[in-house]
Image: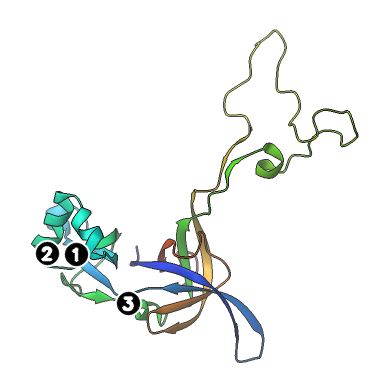
Amino acid sequence: MSLTLIGQKKGMAQVFDQDGKLIVCTVILAEPNTVLDIKRKETHGYNGIQIGGIPMTKAQADRAKKPLKGHFAKLQVEPCNEIRESRLDNVDQYQVGQKLDASVFADVKFVDVEGVSKGKGYQGVMKLFNMAGGPGAHGSGFHRHMGSTGMRSTPGRCFPGGKRASRMGGDRHTVQNLRVVAVKGNLLLVEGAVPGSRGGVVYIRKANKKG
């Protein structure tokens, strides 16, 4: 159980390490997150904190639903677009309204980053599942088809769950064990790529498999 911070993927960059090696990094903007609520085992059955990130604009705040407006008004904090809860062993060091920024990962070597991958629309089986397709000669008629999927008279049907042309991307993925290259203010640089496009919301936490 570790703290999860809300951030935005801003793009990729290249930096040189102390040995002069070029490192390809993802730049994550982790603006200060606000502690919205504290869950305690005596009341809720577990210990954890609820945090909010990516502040709403005035127009977004005006369009927000009444229960959400009431939640922020009760806590007397600025409205935010993303809300995330982290289960922790001890919550005594946190207070409602407290700000958490990228500095929480200053002493962390590896992180796990969760995000939604880029949506690629409806795709065929060759792009989606790397199938070989049919013969490429002229007149074959099924260059990019997946081939026969039928069965014999028993059972006389195709079993569900098979590979078919379908929607690709737009799925939630977690990339594990990304090395923290640098923490500069609200910017977090991690080695490698993370899911999503520029401006996409990502969730950063200390790596489960590597400390």
Mark 2 and mark 3: Cα distance apart in space: 19 Å
Question: Which element type, helix, strand or loop, lies under badge 2?
Answer: helix
**Marks 1 & 2, CB-CB < 8 Å contact:** yes
Examine the rendering and report whether any part of residue 191 can be seen.
Answer: yes
Q: Which color scheme is applied?
A: rainbow
Up-down: is 130 above or below 152?
A: below
- Tell me the amino acid under the disc marked 1: Leu
Left or right, 69 with respect to 181, comes to left
Mark 1 and mark 3: Cα distance apart in space: 14 Å
Mark 1 and mark 2: Cα distance apart in space: 7 Å
- Tell me the amino acid under the disc marked 2: Leu
**Marks 1 & 3, CB-CB < 8 Å contact:** no
Task: Please give the residue where the numbered disc 2 appears in the rendered image.
Answer: 75
Residue 172 on image: x %, y %: 47, 51
Up-down: is 154 above or below 136?
A: above
Left or right, 45 with respect to 104, comes to left
Task: Please give the residue where the numbered disc 3 appears in the rendered image.
Answer: 101
Task: Please give the residue where the numbered disc 1 appears in the rendered image.
Answer: 36
